[in-house]
Image (spheres, rainbow, N blue to C red):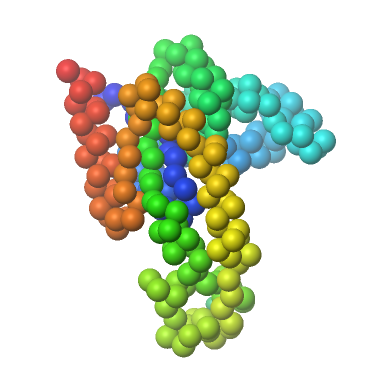
């Protein structure tokens, strides 16, 4: 069986997290979210973790090269032998190039970069409709998953509120940052012929089906 070395990209609210969870289950692949593995390296006090911590303690950004080494350390492990899912890395084109090089140093390469896409309007519609209960954090959506009594949690009756992150103005800002960061990455992977786009406005089952079909085709092509 060939490896499945995958990168996930997508705007907030397009269902990237849901698809990541499905892929983990479908293919039994480890999932590496950059923030999590940086924190894990720091906690384990590995050599790279200590180095990363020295930047984080000062409030500095961890340099590309170091993040890349932390990611590659994970990728070059027994659990990721058959593949991996990366989320949150690479974030920039230099990081993408560093990753390409590091992987080829391991005699591996990316299988595909999966872009779970949705228009800005759709993202705003999805995120700005989210409501969270004050007490336990149960989540609702005014349009897609409304509570029985408007403004109150079905499970515990506590008041529902909108998170600051889900205010339309904040979402617009997050989307601007996302587009600015992601455009060069999308172009990079398009040029390499690795980019595959999926319509994040379809149901999670449909998106999962499309991804699985695409990966099956890629594997067939590889075996030819
Ligand atoms: Zn609740």
Residue at point 49%, 30% (across, down)? 184
Q: Foreground residue, 98 or 158?
A: 98
Where is residue 48? Give x, y as percent.
68, 25
Which residue does the image show at 68% across and 26% down from the upper left? 63
The image quarter containing residue 112 is top left
Residue 73 to residue 17: above or below: above
Please indicate, yes or no, whether residue 28 appears anywhere in the rendered image: no
Vertical placement of residue 58 versus 192, above or below: below
The image shows residue 48, relative to residue 133, as above or below, that is: above
Percent across and percent down for residue 209 are 24, 47
Residue at 63% from the left image edge and 25% from the top image edge: 64
**How many numbered tags mark residues here?**
0
Q: On the picture, is 118 further left or further right than 205?
A: right
Query: Relative to 213, is 105 on the left or the right?
Result: right
The image quarter in which residue 55 lies: top right
Of all residues shown, which one is farthest toward the right?
58
119 to the left or right of 88 = left
Image quarter where ligand 1 lies: bottom right
Determine the residue positioned at 55% across, 57% down.
171
Residue 26 locus on image (x, y percent): 31, 44
Whether 23 is drawn above or below 221: the answer is below
Q: Nearer the viewer, residue 48 or 8?
A: 8
């Amino acid at each position: 069986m060939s490896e499945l070395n995958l990168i996930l990209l997508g705007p907030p609210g397009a269902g990237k997290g849901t698809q990541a969870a499905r892929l983990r289950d479908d293919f039994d692949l480890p999932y590496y979210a950059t923030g999590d593995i940086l924190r894990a390296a720091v906690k384990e006090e590995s050599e790279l973790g200590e180095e990363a911590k020295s930047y984080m303690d000062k409030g500095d950004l961890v340099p590309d090269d170091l993040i890349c080494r932390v990611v590659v350390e994970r990728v070059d492990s027994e659990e990721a032998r058959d593949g991996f899912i990366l989320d949150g890395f690479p974030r920039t084109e230099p990081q993408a190039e560093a990753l390409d090089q590091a992987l080829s140093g391991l005699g591996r390469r990316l299988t595909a970069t999966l872009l779970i896409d949705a228009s800005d309007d759709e993202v705003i519609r999805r995120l700005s409709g989210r409501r969270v209960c004050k007490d336990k954090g149960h989540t609702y959506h005014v349009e897609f998953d409304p509570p029985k009594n408007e403004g109150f949690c079905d499970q515990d009756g506590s008041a529902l509120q909108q998170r600051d992150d889900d205010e339309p103005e904040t979402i617009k800002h997050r989307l601007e940052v996302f587009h600015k960061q992601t455009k060069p990455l999308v172009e990079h992977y398009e040029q390499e012929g690795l980019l595959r786009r999926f319509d994040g406005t379809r149901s999670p089952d449909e998106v999962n089906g499309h991804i699985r079909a695409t990966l099956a085709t890629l594997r067939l092509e590889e075996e030819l």
